[in-house]
Amino acid sequence: MRLPPAILANAEEVLREILRFSAPADTTLSRYFKDHPRLGGRERGAIAECVYNILRNKTFFTDFSEAGGGATMRRLTLLGMADAVGIDSMGGLTEEEVEWLQRITQIDRKLMHKSMRSNMPKWLFDMLVEQMGEDETLLLADSMNSPAPLDLRVNSMKATRDEVMATLAEAPIRSTPTPYAPLGLRVLQKPALQNLPLFKSGAIEVQDEGSQILSQIVGAKRGEMVVDFCAGAGGKTLALGALMRNTGRLYAFDVSEKRLAKLKPRMARSGLSNVHPVQIAHERDAKIKRLAGKIDRVLVDAPCSGLGTLRRNPDVKWRQQPQAIVEMQAKQIGILDGAARLLKGGGRLVYATCSFLKQENEEVAEQFLANHPDFELVPMSKVLAEQKIELEMGDYLKLLPHKHQTDGFFAAVFERKPMAKKVLPPKADAADDEAEDE
Ligand SMILES: C[S@@+](CC[C@H](N)C(=O)[O-])C[C@H]1O[C@@H](n2cnc3c(N)ncnc32)[C@H](O)[C@@H]1O
């Protein structure tokens, strides 16, 4: 059945707002759907898919929509919708529009200029080519411009991976074990999970496999003192709490009250009672000082450009600016410095981002090591072997969607060298005794 012609007008309307890039695309879309309650599920799905296709392919689509008859925004919408539902399912097209769409959908995109094919802003394309060469940039761009699968993490406090797989199959939802993360399941459809008993009971959480691997390399153990320094809504906190088997103490720090508030219902569902959310004002907050030198493991999942999540948030590449990357680096170094004070001798600090830019990754790690001679790098190959994760890495974790089918993630692990024991001055009477012996 064809979609009603009005859907194209709705898609065009919300697209116009999203392309102002004044708010994240998913926020604008949710607000639009709330303001238009008459739109049905299929229609919402088509509008969302249309908008996301345009954000993924904006360079290419804009170029083609600028040629031809009629308004550019209408043509841009037509291209996004044709990719989302197919020309035959679109209602309200003129003959001329059908013919134009057919022509464009037949173009072989592999023949286009490389920076246009990447569908990235020029500054980002150039930055990536400099870092990883043209061929790999194009492979990365292709995978970043494809939708991500849905990954789940099984809450080991509530169920095993096999049990969850079997229960999902009854729904029926087909899932397969993720290749690297031991508690991950990959679902190829996009089912509504919120109403599943498995979700309500806290047996599953939505978490990209890359994010699950990151939580695991923290190596948190039973009974330890652990800090998730930039916990946000707690995606990794919950995984850490379960790895600690609900023992020890896990502090979830963040500067954002709103994000920490989202962690609370997830904590309740998960059944974890070892998690302590703490809002901090900044990375030098006095609440942090109190714990200095007492913590076994600290995860700094730093604020970053978010470019590693382009499969889910394709607007990020259009919203980011090169200057923001420079500012972000200074912030990341500052947060890492603040967090490092927490660690005891032998404790581990994990620095992570969901970015593939060396400015936010290797450069921050190198700067940290240069500023902190009391820390040393633990090669990622060693960390992964300890965790029995079969991934080939060198010094750092670098997950890339075209290689690992995860979002783009980076991580470095540092270990604090054993602290030198304080040498106390000899007691006055002991000194006197020695003097007498002589
Ligand atoms: C990448 S997000 C964290 C995502 C989260 N770990 C998860 O897995 O869902 C980065 C977080 O850092 C927080 N943040 C920003 N500046 C901070 C600071 N100075 N100290 C602690 N957290 C900070 C942000 O509020 C944001 O929630």
Image: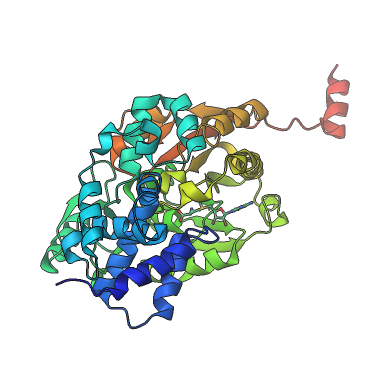
Please name the colour scheme applied to the rendered image: rainbow
Q: Position of residue 41 (x, y in %)?
A: 26, 75
Q: Name which residue lies at 22% across and 48% down.
A: 103
Residue 426 or 133: which is nearer the viewer? 133
In percent of width and height, residue 403 lies at 29, 34
Q: Nearer the viewer, residue 249 or 50?
A: 50
Q: Is residue 202 above or below residue 338?
A: below
From this view, report whether residue 63 is shown above or below residue 364.
Answer: below
**Residue under the point 14% across and 58% down:** 174
| Screen quadrant of the C terminus | top right
Q: Nearer the viewer, residue 230 or 148?
A: 148
- Residue 185 at what x, y percent from top left? 23, 53
* Picture quadrant of residue 433: top right
Residue drawn 27% across the image and 38% down it: 109
Image: 372 above or below 307: above
Q: Residue at x 53, y 61 (%)?
A: 23
- Give x and y (percent) for residue 338: 66, 44
377 left or right, relative to 143: right
